[in-house]
Amino acid sequence: MSIGRFAPSPTGILHLGNLRTALASWLSARSKGGRWIIRMEDVDGPRCRHEFGEQQLRDLAALGMESDLPVIWQSDRSQAYRTALGALHEADRLYPCHCTRKDLQMLASAPHEEDGLRPYPNLCRPRPWEGFETALRFRLPDGPVAWTDELMGLQRDDPATRTGDPLLFRRDGLFAYHLAVVVDDGFQKVTEIVRGMDLRSITATQIRLQEALSLPRPAYAHLGLVTAPDGSRLGKRGGALGLTELHGRGVPVPDLLGWLGFSLGCLGRPEPCAAADLLPRFDWAKVGKGPIALPVDWI
Ligand code: GLU
């Protein structure tokens, strides 16, 4: 059975791009008769707030999307992440890292990738094991990873040269996003991951982690981002456009769903509808690959 998930971080409202991703993942799983689940990724320390997560769940429900299984909050899952770290240590894939933020800032000062960060040069790899109370990095194997993206086709990326060995655990007790995502997708038997294009660059690292934990590889689809009407990056105003703000601007839920459905190739033009109306019309082959501009009168 197909199992899709939407995995927001409760650090604020769900903006238009998040809502589009949520709907695409819902349509993809449900149109195959599969399950759709929501997971709250609140491992990111103080930026995450329970109230934001609750609001996100209410907004998704208002659009007609509810999780088929109880919502998992990653802050409740520390034990599972510890167990995974134990397995990675058994497989000799972890090493302690003592680099300070300052060391890493110096490394990051010469832009390399499009995100402006140089890969971590695996400085601490030679360190002997010191136990689980220290920062831990994952030893990546050399070489590229290939996978097929539902929208982008064949992808190839080398995480070892892009990012270097990722940090999985911080000395202050925080588990890294990569670890939590991979462990939970495995635990929840997720078969398809739909998310924004801005996360495409971390897919290869996550595939390496799945391999190291002997977890199956889900299918991936990375959706183009929502831009301002002129195609530029959404600024603060547009970036904060969520359900409540749109409502305040006179965009009722059926109109929003109509635009989202249109933007995902389900409708020839935006027209008011319910999420369920879009189900029989959803087809990945009709979803555009590029970014999509939000309507002029919404901003
Ligand atoms: N929690 C991540 C975010 O909101 C998304 C993770 C994922 O879909 O893999 O940016």
Image: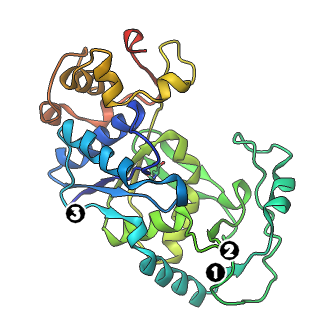
Q: Quadrant of the C terminus?
A: top left
* Crowding near the residue tagged with mark 2, few <14, some 14–19, many ≥20 C-alpha atoms within 10 Å: many
User: Going 66% across and 70% down the picture, which residue do you hit?
Assistant: 140
Q: In which quarter of the image is the N terminus?
A: bottom left
The residue beneath circle 3 is 70
Picture disc at residue 93: 1
Proximity of marks 2 and 1: CB atoms separated by less than 8 Å: yes
Q: Does dot 2 land on a helix, a strand or a loop?
A: loop
Q: Nearer the viewer, mark 1 or mark 3?
A: 3
Picture disc at residue 139: 2
x and y, in percent, of residue 132 in the image: 62, 86
Question: Relative to the observer, which residue lies in front, 269 or 107?
Answer: 107
Question: Relative to the observer, which residue lies in front, 204 or 163?
Answer: 163
* Crowding near the residue tagged with mark 1, few <14, some 14–19, many ≥20 C-alpha atoms within 10 Å: some
**Of callouts 1 and 3, which one flags the residue occurring earlier in the amino acid sequence?**
3
Q: Does dot 3 land on a helix, a strand or a loop?
A: loop
x and y, in percent, of residue 252 in the image: 22, 21
Q: Is residue 234 above or below residue 17?
A: above
x and y, in percent, of residue 221 in the image: 41, 45
Quadrant for residue 280, please give it. Answer: top left
User: Going 76% across and 56% down the picture, which residue do you hit?
Assistant: 119
